[in-house]
Every structure is written in structure tokens, then in C-alpha cells.
Image: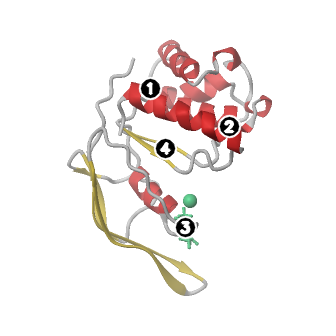
Amino acid sequence: MSSTSGGQVSIRDLSKSFSIGGRSLAVLRTLNLDIRSGECLVIVGASGSGKTTLLRILAGLEAADSGGVAINGKPVHGVGAERAVIFQEPRLLPWLTVLGNVAFGLEVRGVPKAEAEKRARFYIALVGLAEFSDAFPRQLSGGMAQRVGIARALTVQPEILLLDEPLGALDAMTKIGMQEELARIWSEENVT
Ligand SMILES: Nc1ncnc2c1ncn2[C@@H]1O[C@H](COP(=O)(O)OP(=O)(O)O)[C@@H](O)[C@H]1O
Ligand SMILES: [Mg+2]
């Protein structure tokens, strides 16, 4: 079921400032970066250095002040089906089951419910939660909820997967297991 081939990202002269209490804070200054198709790039930086801001611009959730991002040669304006985000906190919909949450992204893209649920079940199994398809978010541990977030992002079969410290909120033991799990999923799913 892995049909993605990875996407190519080019960031050109990207700048972004925020105004905080009347002061302008330059968060990203003429950033240039190329990420090849199939590459796994990790950005490391102190808290507040602009990692989330860059990720939100790549996701199309935030606009740059100047410069821009192109994916597979096409300029990014807003969110796109070829990109999916795994947030620091999974942000699941509390009134939907695990299956409902994971299938949701496909359903809003117009995929028929039966097909959406079939694909969702594949990725729920991939993150090891097959037995919890009918559970609600409040019935899951933090690590399990984070895995649902991962399954939800993978189900739309993105070319580019954007992860914002996806393991940051987990305890050390769970973190190690999830790290291995993400590495396995990345190598099996062929995403950038
Ligand atoms: N929406 C916003 N409005 C104002 N300032 C912001 C906003 N988002 C982020 N910032 C500021 O931009 C800087 C970088 O934040 P962020 O990208 O979240 O850093 P990181 O993810 O590396 O910890 C911080 O100083 C933060 O205060
Ligand atoms: Mg951040």
C-alpha cells in the first residue's frame, strides 16, 4: 500500500519575523535549504529557535514574509495533499474513534468511507494499534495517541512527512520504542 515516491523540497531566501509586544523578532533569516526526494532531514535547535515556524511554513499553515518554498518545483501556497504533519501533540478529535480519526483525513478528501476505513486499518495495524481501532482518544495512553497521529498522517500517503518533535511529550522508554517504530515506518513507506 506504499505508493509514495517522496517529494523534493527547496527553500529559497525564506524569512519570517513575528511582532511581539511591538518589537519585531526575526525568527528565520534568508534561509536556503534543499531536501532531496527520499531524504530524511532532522533539524536540531534550541527551544524558540524557529523549528516549528519553519515546519508550519513548509506545511502551508503559516505564510513567509519573503522568499518561499517549492515542492517538486511548484511553489507552496497553503496546505497540500502531498504533505502531512505529525504535530508535537496529536490533536485527535475526541468524538471519533481511532479508526474515525485516522480515516478522517481521507474522508474530507472525498475518499468513500469504506475505502477510507480500509486504508486507515492498514496504517493503524502498521503502528501496532489494530486492537484499539474502536477506542476513543481518552482511552489511550500518550504514546498510543501519538501513534494514532502518525497513522493519520501516513494514511493520506503523503510524499512529505513533517514531524514536529513528535516524541517530545513521551517518557524515555516509550520514546526509544517510537523512534525505532518511526525509522521502520519511514524505510517501509518511502517518504521524505
Ligand atoms: N504566532 C506567533 N506569534 C508571535 N511569535 C511567535 C509565534 N510563533 C512563534 N513565535 C516566536 O518565534 C520564535 C520561534 O518559535 P518556534 O518556531 O515555535 O520555535 P521552536 O519550535 O524551535 O521551539 C519564538 O521566539 C516564538 O516566541
Ligand atoms: Mg517547536
Q: How far apart are labels 4 and 2 at the CA level? A: 20 Å
Lower sequence index among marks 4 and 2: 4
Disc 3 target residue: 46
Query: Which residue in the structure is indicated by mark 4?
Result: 85
CA gap, disc 1 to disc 3? 40 Å
Residue labelled 3 has its Cβ within 8 Å of some atom of ligand 1: yes
Find the distance from the CA under tag 2 to the CA under tag 3: 23 Å
> What's the mark number on residue 54?
none
Q: Quadrant of residue 158?
A: top left
At label 2, the amino acid type is Thr
Left or right of residue 160, residue 34 in this image:
left
Look at label 1 and name its amino acid. Answer: Gly
Query: What amino acid type is highlighted by mark number 3?
Result: Ala
Q: Where does the C terminus fall, quadrant-wise? A: top left
Q: Residue 67, position in %: x, y? A: 29, 68
State if disc 3 and disc 1 touch (CB < 8 Å): no
Residue under numbered circle 1? 110
Q: Residue at x 31, y 53 (%)?
A: 76
Q: Is residue 104 visible?
A: yes
